[in-house]
Amino acid sequence: MTELNLEQITEKFFQKESRVELLSSIETSQGLRVELVSGNKRLKLIYYEKEGIVESYIENNDSKREEGSTTSLYSITNKFLQELSNEQERQIRYFFVTQHPNMEIWAKENYLNVFGDPDEEYQDKLNRKVRVKKYIPHS
């Protein structure tokens, strides 16, 4: 089997997805940066390959508000991170961090349905709620 680089894994995965648009996928010296858009939301994923850690940032863009955009982006992120874990044959830890009240409301209502139970949950030094999801490779 030919080993795919991070950009190839990303592009291959998002070719199958129609609910979100892949804006960019850039390999960096640290790993991978991916930008996705759905409706009025833009999600930036940053994968630190050496550490096996992913973090994300979501923001509004100038598009018209579209119901379910946040959930669509995080649902695809969940599937993508499992695929990345499988392709790289390694554990990946995703840190879902909230500080904004609206995102905490979203998390209380939707996190379990999208990501399942967090593997860890705590308040960080900046008083942000942190949920950690571990992705274990499946054959």
Image: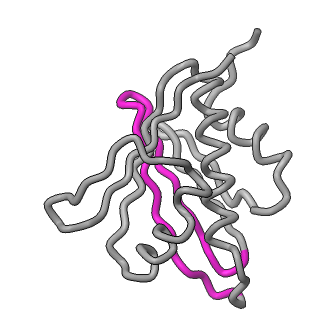
Q: Is residue 17 visible?
A: yes
**Residue 20 appears at what percent x and percent y?**
75, 62
Q: Is residue 123 left or right of residue 109?
A: left
In this view, the residue farthest toward the top is: 1
Quick check: 100 above or below 37?
A: below
User: Which of 127/37 is in front?
Assistant: 127
- Span of residues in magenta: 39-63
Q: Is residue 43 magenta?
A: yes
Q: Is residue 135 left or right of residue 10?
A: left
Q: Is residue 126 magenta?
A: no
Quick check: 88 above or below 101?
A: above
**Residue 24 appears at what percent x and percent y?**
65, 55
User: Which of 18/100 is in front?
Assistant: 100
**Residue 78 appears at what percent x and percent y?**
61, 47
Q: Residue at x 65, y 43 (%)?
A: 80
Colour mode? one colour
Q: Residue at x 33, y 44 (%)?
A: 120
Q: Is residue 123 left or right of residue 80?
A: left
Quick check: 99 above or below 87?
A: below
Q: Is residue 30 visible?
A: no
Q: Residue at x 45, y 43 (%)?
A: 133
Q: Is residue 97 left or right of residue 18?
A: left
The quadrant of the rendering that contains the N terminus is top right
Prevailing SS of the magenta stretch: strand
**Residue 32 appears at what percent x and percent y?**
52, 42
The quadrant of the rendering that contains the C terminus is top right
